[in-house]
Amino acid sequence: MDLPSFKYHPDPLGTGSIIASDQRCQVCRQSRGYIYAAHIYSIRELESVCPWCIHDGAAHIMFNAEFTDPRGIGGHGEWDPVPPEVLQEVAFRTPGFAGWQDHRWFTHCGDAAAFLGPMGREELERLGEEALSAIRRQCRLSGEEWESYLARMDRHGGPTAYVFRCLHCGLLGGYSDAH
């Protein structure tokens, strides 16, 4: 069975937000082979939600589930505002991602950007100078402070970058945090 397509999270398997699993979805009660693996904010403790119930909004409708805090979409006012329908699609019908602190979703050109994934130094360097510069600017670090921070960056622990690509102009953006 093919996974549903998410405009703002094009590779949820690659980012680790969706994983292979035989667990039954608490929304549709089916075992479809995949389950959401990041935090869910809802009126009930939800531990297993399938990608289909995220995509069609059933998890939000039944349990008021949010996969990204709506206030974090646009970085709490740091980035471009987006129309309500975009905010709703990202918060209620798009897989979020695991992070250390409050999640933010990069916005640009009046729209939410596509989440590329959590990244450490190696992944950022593979993306190139644009990705490195975007995270460096967001951190407000330079010189030796930046070099030390970058050296400790790790996708799975320590400081982690969360990188996005604008769907309209291709600009890379995002942020980093640590536990």
Image (cartoon, grey):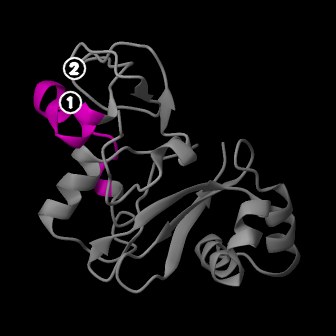
Left or right position of 6 against 82 = right
**Magenta residues, start to end:** 52-71
- Label 2: state its secondary structure: loop
Residue 157 is one of the magenta-drawn residues: no
Q: Which residue is mark 2?
A: 27
The spot of residue 11 in percent (x, y) is: 47, 52
Residue 43, label in figure = none
Q: Residues within 10 Å of mark 2 (few under 14, many from 20)?
A: some
Question: What residue sits 45% from the left and 50% below the top?
Answer: 103
Residue 64 vs residue 26, the one in the foreground: 26
Amino acid type, mark 1 = Ala
Q: Note whether 149 is above or below 95 in the view shown.
A: below
Magenta region, mostly helix, strand or loop? Answer: helix
The spot of residue 42 in percent (x, y) is: 26, 28
Residue 53 is one of the magenta-drawn residues: yes
- Residue at the extreme front: 1
- Label 1: state its secondary structure: helix
Residue 138 vs residue 64, the one in the foreground: 64
